[in-house]
Protein backbone atom coordinates (compact mmCIF):
# COMPACT_ATOMS: atom_id res chain seq x y z
CA UNK A 1 0.00 0.00 0.00
CA UNK A 2 0.92 3.68 -0.26
CA UNK A 3 0.05 6.31 2.31
CA UNK A 4 -2.10 9.23 1.23
CA UNK A 5 0.84 11.63 1.44
CA UNK A 6 3.01 9.42 -0.79
CA UNK A 7 0.23 9.16 -3.38
CA UNK A 8 -0.13 12.94 -3.36
CA UNK A 9 3.58 13.64 -3.66
CA UNK A 10 3.94 11.17 -6.54
CA UNK A 11 1.00 12.67 -8.41
CA UNK A 12 -1.25 9.66 -7.75
CA UNK A 13 -3.88 11.55 -5.80
CA UNK A 14 -7.22 9.73 -5.62
CA UNK A 15 -10.52 10.23 -3.84
CA UNK A 16 -9.05 8.89 -0.61
CA UNK A 17 -6.01 11.19 -0.55
CA UNK A 18 -8.04 14.19 -1.83
CA UNK A 19 -10.18 14.22 1.32
CA UNK A 20 -7.22 15.21 3.52
CA UNK A 21 -6.87 18.48 1.60
CA UNK A 22 -10.54 19.46 1.56
CA UNK A 23 -10.21 21.38 4.83
CA UNK A 24 -7.58 23.71 3.37
CA UNK A 25 -8.45 27.00 1.69
CA UNK A 26 -6.00 29.32 0.00
CA UNK A 27 -2.97 29.95 2.20
CA UNK A 28 0.06 28.50 3.92
CA UNK A 29 -0.43 25.70 6.47
CA UNK A 30 2.63 24.77 8.49
CA UNK A 31 3.37 21.62 10.49
CA UNK A 32 0.77 19.27 8.98
CA UNK A 33 0.66 15.50 8.42
CA UNK A 34 3.10 14.71 11.23
CA UNK A 35 4.83 11.34 11.47
CA UNK A 36 7.81 10.23 13.53
CA UNK A 37 9.75 7.00 14.00
CA UNK A 38 12.05 5.60 16.67
CA UNK A 39 13.89 2.36 15.90
CA UNK A 40 15.13 0.06 18.66
CA UNK A 41 14.18 -3.50 19.47
CA UNK A 42 10.91 -2.59 17.78
CA UNK A 43 9.83 0.30 15.60
CA UNK A 44 7.70 2.96 17.29
CA UNK A 45 5.66 5.37 15.19
CA UNK A 46 3.58 8.38 16.20
CA UNK A 47 1.43 10.43 13.84
CA UNK A 48 -1.21 13.13 13.63
CA UNK A 49 -4.83 12.09 13.02
CA UNK A 50 -4.65 12.09 9.21
CA UNK A 51 -2.68 8.82 9.21
CA UNK A 52 -5.31 6.86 11.19
CA UNK A 53 -6.90 5.17 8.19
CA UNK A 54 -3.59 4.36 6.54
CA UNK A 55 -2.22 2.80 9.72
CA UNK A 56 -5.31 0.62 10.16
CA UNK A 57 -5.13 -0.48 6.53
CA UNK A 58 -1.41 -1.16 6.85
CA UNK A 59 -1.94 -3.38 9.90
CA UNK A 60 -4.92 -5.12 8.32
CA UNK A 61 -3.01 -5.89 5.13
CA UNK A 62 0.08 -7.23 6.87
CA UNK A 63 -1.23 -9.14 9.89
CA UNK A 64 -4.39 -10.98 10.81
CA UNK A 65 -5.57 -9.10 13.91
CA UNK A 66 -8.86 -7.99 15.41
CA UNK A 67 -9.71 -4.32 15.89
CA UNK A 68 -11.70 -2.58 18.62
CA UNK A 69 -12.83 1.03 18.99
CA UNK A 70 -14.89 3.37 16.84
CA UNK A 71 -15.64 3.49 13.15
CA UNK A 72 -17.02 6.69 11.61
CA UNK A 73 -18.97 6.31 8.38
CA UNK A 74 -20.94 8.76 6.26
CA UNK A 75 -23.14 5.88 5.15
CA UNK A 76 -25.21 3.53 7.30
CA UNK A 77 -23.62 0.07 7.59
CA UNK A 78 -26.05 -2.72 6.72
CA UNK A 79 -27.17 -4.65 9.77
CA UNK A 80 -25.24 -2.47 12.22
CA UNK A 81 -26.55 -0.20 14.95
CA UNK A 82 -24.80 3.12 15.11
CA UNK A 83 -25.41 6.60 16.47
CA UNK A 84 -25.54 9.50 14.05
CA UNK A 85 -23.54 12.52 15.14
CA UNK A 86 -22.51 15.60 13.12
CA UNK A 87 -23.44 13.95 9.85
CA UNK A 88 -21.63 10.64 10.40
CA UNK A 89 -22.62 7.28 11.82
CA UNK A 90 -20.54 6.15 14.80
CA UNK A 91 -20.13 2.41 15.34
CA UNK A 92 -18.59 0.88 18.43
CA UNK A 93 -16.83 -2.36 17.53
CA UNK A 94 -14.97 -5.05 19.41
CA UNK A 95 -12.70 -7.77 18.03
CA UNK A 96 -13.69 -7.06 14.43
CA UNK A 97 -11.93 -8.00 11.18
CA UNK A 98 -13.53 -4.90 9.54
CA UNK A 99 -14.93 -6.93 6.64
CA UNK A 100 -18.47 -5.71 7.31
CA UNK A 101 -17.60 -2.02 6.84
CA UNK A 102 -17.21 -0.20 3.52
CA UNK A 103 -16.63 3.46 2.60
CA UNK A 104 -15.33 4.28 6.07
CA UNK A 105 -14.75 7.94 6.94
CA UNK A 106 -12.36 7.31 9.84
CA UNK A 107 -11.01 4.27 11.67
CA UNK A 108 -10.43 5.18 15.33
CA UNK A 109 -9.28 1.73 16.35
CA UNK A 110 -6.85 -0.25 18.47
CA UNK A 111 -5.23 -3.61 17.79
CA UNK A 112 -2.86 -5.64 19.90
CA UNK A 113 -0.81 -8.79 19.48
CA UNK A 114 2.80 -9.90 20.01
CA UNK A 115 4.08 -8.16 16.86
CA UNK A 116 1.81 -5.12 16.50
CA UNK A 117 0.29 -2.65 18.97
CA UNK A 118 -1.87 0.06 17.40
CA UNK A 119 -3.56 2.80 19.41
CA UNK A 120 -5.67 5.65 17.99
CA UNK A 121 -7.54 8.29 19.95
CA UNK A 122 -11.33 8.09 19.76
CA UNK A 123 -12.34 11.69 18.97
CA UNK A 124 -11.28 13.59 15.87
CA UNK A 125 -9.71 17.01 16.50
CA UNK A 126 -11.68 20.10 15.62
CA UNK A 127 -10.64 21.89 12.40
CA UNK A 128 -8.18 24.71 12.97
CA UNK A 129 -5.16 26.48 11.50
CA UNK A 130 -2.97 26.71 14.61
CA UNK A 131 -0.11 24.28 14.00
CA UNK A 132 0.95 24.49 17.66
CA UNK A 133 -2.18 22.59 18.71
CA UNK A 134 -1.80 19.65 16.34
CA UNK A 135 -1.57 16.36 18.24
CA UNK A 136 1.52 14.54 17.00
CA UNK A 137 0.63 11.48 19.08
CA UNK A 138 -2.97 10.97 17.92
CA UNK A 139 -1.95 7.57 16.52
CA UNK A 140 0.77 5.27 17.77
CA UNK A 141 2.10 2.01 16.37
CA UNK A 142 4.67 -0.34 17.87
CA UNK A 143 5.67 -2.99 15.36
CA UNK A 144 8.21 -5.76 14.90
CA UNK A 145 11.23 -4.78 12.80
CA UNK A 146 10.52 -7.52 10.27
CA UNK A 147 7.80 -5.21 8.88
CA UNK A 148 10.27 -2.43 8.12
CA UNK A 149 10.50 -3.02 4.32
CA UNK A 150 6.73 -2.63 3.80
CA UNK A 151 6.49 0.13 6.40
CA UNK A 152 9.26 2.07 4.66
CA UNK A 153 7.57 1.65 1.27
CA UNK A 154 4.28 3.05 2.59
CA UNK A 155 5.38 5.87 4.90
CA UNK A 156 9.17 6.41 4.85
CA UNK A 157 10.09 5.75 1.22
CA UNK A 158 12.69 8.54 1.08
CA UNK A 159 14.82 7.65 4.11
CA UNK A 160 17.45 4.98 4.75
CA UNK A 161 18.26 3.10 7.95
CA UNK A 162 18.15 5.38 10.99
CA UNK A 163 17.37 5.58 14.70
CA UNK A 164 15.03 8.59 14.84
CA UNK A 165 13.01 10.39 12.21
CA UNK A 166 10.47 13.19 12.45
CA UNK A 167 8.62 14.43 9.37
CA UNK A 168 6.22 17.31 8.94
CA UNK A 169 4.69 18.96 5.89
CA UNK A 170 3.98 22.55 5.00
CA UNK A 171 1.04 22.88 2.63
CA UNK A 172 0.87 25.94 0.38
CA UNK A 173 -2.41 26.29 -1.50
CA UNK A 174 -2.31 28.91 -4.24
CA UNK A 175 -5.23 27.77 -6.38
CA UNK A 176 -8.56 26.01 -5.89
CA UNK A 177 -9.87 24.38 -9.05
CA UNK A 178 -13.67 24.18 -9.04
CA UNK A 179 -15.49 21.38 -10.87
CA UNK A 180 -17.08 22.43 -14.14
CA UNK A 181 -20.87 22.45 -14.60
CA UNK A 182 -21.55 21.67 -10.91
CA UNK A 183 -24.16 23.77 -9.10
CA UNK A 184 -24.56 21.89 -5.81
CA UNK A 185 -22.47 23.74 -3.14
CA UNK A 186 -21.76 20.54 -1.20
CA UNK A 187 -20.57 18.77 -4.35
CA UNK A 188 -18.44 21.76 -5.31
CA UNK A 189 -16.75 21.63 -1.92
CA UNK A 190 -16.27 17.88 -2.18
CA UNK A 191 -14.84 17.91 -5.70
CA UNK A 192 -12.77 21.12 -5.70
CA UNK A 193 -9.07 20.38 -6.18
CA UNK A 194 -6.27 22.11 -4.28
CA UNK A 195 -3.14 23.08 -6.19
CA UNK A 196 0.13 24.30 -4.75
CA UNK A 197 3.26 22.91 -3.14
CA UNK A 198 4.09 20.52 -0.33
CA UNK A 199 7.31 21.10 1.60
CA UNK A 200 8.36 17.80 3.18
CA UNK A 201 10.61 18.60 6.16
CA UNK A 202 12.62 15.76 7.68
CA UNK A 203 14.87 15.41 10.69
CA UNK A 204 16.79 12.15 10.34
CA UNK A 205 19.07 11.39 13.29
CA UNK A 206 19.56 15.13 13.78
CA UNK A 207 20.19 15.94 10.12
CA UNK A 208 17.56 18.36 8.83
CA UNK A 209 16.50 18.51 5.18
CA UNK A 210 13.49 19.56 3.12
CA UNK A 211 12.13 19.21 -0.38
CA UNK A 212 9.43 21.16 -2.17
CA UNK A 213 7.01 19.27 -4.41
CA UNK A 214 4.21 20.69 -6.59
CA UNK A 215 0.92 18.90 -6.08
CA UNK A 216 -2.73 18.81 -7.05
CA UNK A 217 -5.18 16.93 -4.85
Image (tube, rainbow, N blue to C red):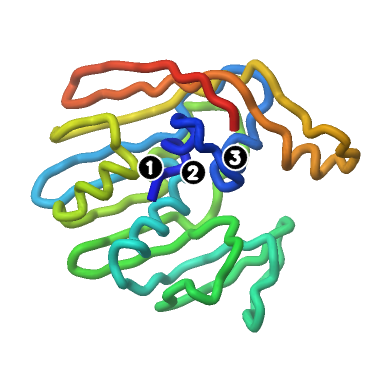
Callout 3 secondary element: helix
Using a 10 Å C-alpha cutoff, classify the residue at mark 1 as few (fewer than 14 neighbours), some (14 to 19) or many (20 or more): many
Going from the N terminus, do you reach mark 3 or mark 1 first?
3
Residue 119, labelled with which disc? none
Going from the N terminus, do you reach mark 2 or mark 3 first?
3
* Cα separation between marks 2 and 3: 12 Å
The answer to whether mark 2 and mark 1 are in CB contact below 8 A is yes
Instruction: Give the percent coordinates (x, y) of residue 124.
Output: 55, 50
Residue farthest toward the bottom in the current orientation of the protein: 79
* Cα separation between marks 2 and 1: 8 Å
Residue farthest toward the left in the current orientation of the protein: 41
Residue 47, labelled with which disc? 1
Instruction: Give the percent coordinates (x, y) of residue 145.
Output: 15, 52
Q: In this view, does 163 lie above or below 140?
A: above
Question: Could you tell me which residue is drawn at 45 percent across and 35 percent down?
Answer: 33
Instruction: Give the percent coordinates (x, y) of residue 57.
Output: 41, 58
Question: Could you tell me which residue is drawn at 45 percent across and 36 percent down?
Answer: 5
Mark closer to the observer (2, 3)? 3
* Cα separation between marks 3 and 1: 19 Å
Kindly identify which residue carries mark 3. 18
Using a 10 Å C-alpha cutoff, classify the residue at mark 2 as few (fewer than 14 neighbours), some (14 to 19) or many (20 or more): many
Which of the 4 image quarters holds residue 128? top right
Amino acid sequence: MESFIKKTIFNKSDKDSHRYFMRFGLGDYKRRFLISLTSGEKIKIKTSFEFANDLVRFVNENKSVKFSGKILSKEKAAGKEGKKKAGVFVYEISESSLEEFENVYYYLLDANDSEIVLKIKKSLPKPGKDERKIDEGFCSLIIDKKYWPVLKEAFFWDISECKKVSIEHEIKINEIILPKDEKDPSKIRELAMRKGTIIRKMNIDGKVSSKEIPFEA
